[in-house]
Image: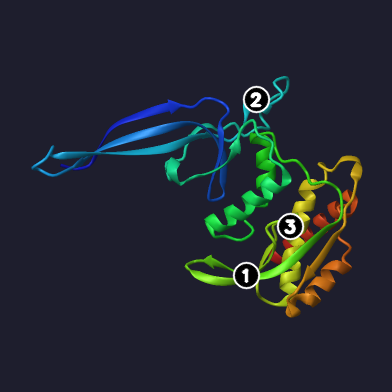
Amino acid sequence: MDNKIVSTTYVPLQPPFQIIKYGLDIAMQIGTLIVTIQKEGDPKGLGYEIETHSHPVVSYENKDKVDLNHQLSAYHFLEGAVWNFVEVKDVTTICLSNSILSWQEYIDFLWRDIACIKKLNSYNHTIWILDKLCGGVEPPIAQNYHIKLVKDEISLDGKLTPIIRSRHEDIFALIARVTYEADIRLEIEDQVMVFMHALINRIKDNKVFYIWYETEEEDLKKTVFELNSKRCYTDPIYYSKSYKNRLAELTKKKS
């Protein structure tokens, strides 16, 4: 007997919904599609087996956060999409649709996600997606911060890869491959700019805070010195210009 689908059942969920992630995809789970498959079993028993698979049914927008007095063509209302490439047991739950994450909770999620999907710098877009799907992320308090760069290893493509990263309790989740010193500095600067760009409209009264880098690794002290010489303030004007200039530079290199 060939395997065959016996039934499919849609189970709607109730709010607050789970905000879930798999790979680089983030969405709000509004239901579950349960697929039941009949398989050939032991002839001495029932003669068949039942196998079930539960797939998330998602929406990429939260209608509760949409201004109903405006046209909706600017929104990505893909509602009822089935993640048929993954099962519910394999997704990561970030939070609920009525949640507001603290900044540290957001950073903790980024570190867990990096360890889970085993990719570097895959998370820079998540803060804007969370704005759409839940209550968003609270910005950090404007004050002075220290970021300590340390050496570590991460499993990538089945092998341990040396990296430079910030500590898990630091204000930003920064991670760079161990290559040339200049590449480490540029990679960290790029990531900081993405974080700053996300914070531009979140820090009230255009307040600024100062980031001071430090390390105990002798071969990283030059990198730390150069990072500190940049005077990394969260000044919206400074970082919006720097971010645009850096993007233009990267675009030019690729063309």
What's the coloring here? rainbow
Task: Report which residue position mark 1 lands on.
Answer: 152
Task: Report which residue position mark 3 lands on.
Answer: 170
Q: Looking at the picture, does residue 44 appear above or below residue 183?
A: above
What SS does tag 3 mark?
loop
What SS does tag 2 mark?
helix
Question: Which circle marks residue 218 in the picture?
Answer: none
User: Badge 1, how many Cα within 10 Å: few under 14, some, many 20+?
Assistant: some
Q: Looking at the picture, does residue 12 appear above or below residue 193?
A: above
Name which of mark 2 and mark 1 comes first in the sequence.
Answer: 2
Q: Which amino acid lies under the numbered mark 3 shown in the image of this protein? A: Asp
What SS does tag 1 mark?
strand
Name which of mark 3 and mark 2 comes first in the sequence.
Answer: 2
The reply, left or right, for residue 56 in relation to residue 4 is right
x, y (%) of residue 16? 58, 28
The residue sitting at 79% across, 50% down in the picture is 197
Q: Which amino acid lies under the numbered mark 2 shown in the image of this protein? A: Asp
- Label 3 – label 2 distance at C-alpha: 33 Å
Are circles 2 and 1 on residues that touch, CB within 8 Å?
no
Are circles 3 and 2 on residues that touch, CB within 8 Å?
no
Are circles 3 and 1 on residues that touch, CB within 8 Å?
no
The image quadrant of residue 214 is bottom right
Name which of mark 3 and mark 1 comes first in the sequence.
Answer: 1
x, y (%) of residue 9? 36, 28
Q: Which of 187 and 118 is in front in this view?
A: 118
- Label 2 – label 1 distance at C-alpha: 42 Å
Question: Which circle marks residue 64 in the picture?
Answer: 2
The image quadrant of residue 33 is top left
User: Badge 3, how many Cα within 10 Å: few under 14, some, many 20+?
Assistant: some
Q: Which of 145 and 253 is in front in this view?
A: 145
